[in-house]
């Protein structure tokens, strides 16, 4: 950020100034067009300028934007019921972001422990996880870069590797204060790493045996991105707590915590709150997003186009330098054997928006309206750039 900017220097902005968007395309202030392979980091579910969403938001702004949570508003109940019906869970708390949803999940786990007589409840979290940047959620996050400079961290988190069932069982045997396991069904910032489906089933069984809450962070991988409403549904399980955000309202800030079983009754009046959580504008955006997703078959589209995109990338990038193309639906990571942040700018210069996470993973999170044709265009831009990058960039020394 330039020194003269009034904004705090918290982001390293790319040389792209957005003017507007339309469908899967973004346009800069110079009139250049870019294929959006990131959708605002898994936020713009319906792409840009979707006519049904635009009409719904215009109508809602003219009706009412905000009411306090001291008063009932039908849209809040309606979106909550939609989430309950699609998750087979029980009830919902609305907030404004994934960070807030994860913070609420942590509070549920702690109060659940205190209600059971545990003075210092502990939550098992995963290495390479990302749950947010508040003091509690960055403490739960498994990334020292995010935590550095904000110590002392919040206590009460026990860390284990994703998919390490033996490690989780050891924790169960050694730490009587554990009350919950908190993990991402697919680690996003950690490099698009899907948890093994059998691992998720085993964690569900262990939580049932120990009386722990299973809390699955679906902030990035939920709301249809993988081809099911929620990524954990590929494993055929139901969590006790499920934070949501990002794509739930197609660009309008929103967060939600969906609860089930014993977790559904942990919060009572006065235990938690949010001034803007559940505001009518966000609720209208969430309802419309789900309605359009169903009307346009976007879950099936995410699964089908995602498989096509991954298969094409594997074919085009096969060879030295490619570690793996992985993901589920339209949540895809292309891991290289060397840091590749340079590719973000190279892609922009060719009209494609992507980003790089975990230093060496190209992250693709396009809108769920992406077609096979859009996927082919993406591969047509990205693959030659990756091949050229690999040909001239040495592998970093170990």
Image: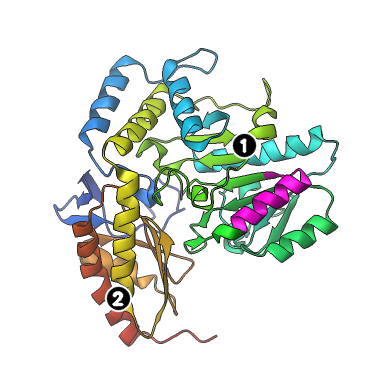
Q: Is residue 267 magenta?
A: no
Image location of residue 231, percent across then percent down: 48, 50
Residue at 45% of width from left, 48% of height from top? 8
**In the rendered image, is residue 150 in sight?**
no
Q: Which residues are magenta?
A: 199-213
Q: Is residue 263 above or below residue 362?
A: above
Element assignment for label 2? helix
Considering only vertical position in the picture, is 61 above or below 126?
Answer: above
Furthest-top residue in this view: 71
Mark 2: few/some/many CA within 10 Å (<14, 14-19, 20+): few
Tell me the chief SS of the magenta region: helix
Q: Secondary structure at mark 1?
A: helix
Question: Looking at the picture, how far across and down is residue 80, in whole percent?
Answer: 48, 27
Residue furthest to the front in view is: 236
Residue at the disc numbered 1? 104
| Lateral position of residue 361 relative to residue 369, left or right | right
Q: Are marks 2 and 1 in contact (CB under 8 Å)?
A: no
**Where residue 87 appears, x then y in whole percent?**
51, 37
The Cα–Cα distance between marks 2 and 1, rounded to whole angstroms, is 42 Å
| Applied colour scheme | rainbow
Residue 282 in view:
yes
Mark closer to the observer (2, 1): 2
Sequence-first tag of 2 and 1: 1
Q: Quadrant of the image for the N terminus? A: bottom left
Q: Residue at x 41, y 38 (%)?
A: 248
Disc 2: which residue: 315
């Amino acid at each position: 950020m330039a020194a003269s900017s009034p904004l705090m220097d918290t982001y390293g902005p790319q040389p792209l100034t957005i003017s507007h968007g339309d469908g899967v395309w973004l346009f800069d202030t110079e009139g250049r067009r870019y294929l959006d392979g990131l959708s605002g980091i898994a936020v713009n579910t319906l792409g840009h300028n979707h006519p049904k969403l635009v009409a719904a938001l215009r109508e809602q702004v003219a009706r009412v934007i905000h009411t306090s949570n001291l008063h009932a508003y039908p849209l809040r109940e309606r979106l909550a019921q939609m989430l309950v019906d699609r998750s087979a869970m029980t009830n919902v708390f609305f907030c404004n972001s994934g960070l807030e949803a994860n913070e609420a999940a942590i509070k549920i786990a702690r109060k659940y422990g205190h209600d059971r007589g545990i003075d210092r409840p502990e939550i098992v979290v995963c290495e390479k996880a990302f749950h947010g940047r508040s003091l509690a959620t960055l403490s739960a996050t498994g990334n020292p870069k995010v935590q550095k400079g904000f110590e002392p961290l919040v206590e009460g988190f026990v860390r284990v590797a994703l998919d390490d069932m033996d490690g989780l069982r050891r924790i169960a045997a050694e730490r009587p204060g554990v009350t919950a396991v908190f993990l991402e069904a697919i680690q996003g910032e950690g490099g698009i790493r899907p948890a093994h489906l059998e691992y998720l089933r085993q964690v569900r069984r262990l939580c049932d045996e120990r009386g722990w809450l299973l809390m699955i962070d679906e902030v990035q991988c939920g709301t249809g991105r993988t081809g099911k409403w929620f990524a954990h549904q590929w494993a055929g399980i139901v969590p006790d707590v499920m934070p949501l955000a990002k794509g739930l309202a197609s660009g309008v800030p929103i967060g939600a915590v969906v609860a089930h079983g014993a977790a559904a009754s942990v919060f009572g009046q006065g235990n938690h709150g949010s001034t803007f959580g559940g505001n009518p504008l966000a609720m209208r955006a969430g309802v419309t997003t789900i309605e359009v997703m169903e009307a346009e078959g976007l879950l099936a589209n995410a699964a089908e186009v995602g498989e096509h995109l991954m298969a094409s990338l594997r074919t085009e990038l096969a060879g030295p330098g490619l570690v793996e193309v992985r993901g589920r639906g339209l949540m895809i990571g292309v891991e290289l054997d060397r840091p590749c942040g340079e590719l973000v700018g190279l892609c922009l210069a060719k009209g494609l928006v992507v980003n790089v996470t975990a230093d060496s993973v190209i992250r693709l999170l396009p809108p769920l309206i992406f077609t096979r044709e859009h996927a082919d265009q993406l591969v047509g831009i990205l693959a030659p750039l990756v091949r050229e990058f690999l040909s001239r960039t040495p592998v970093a020394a170990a």
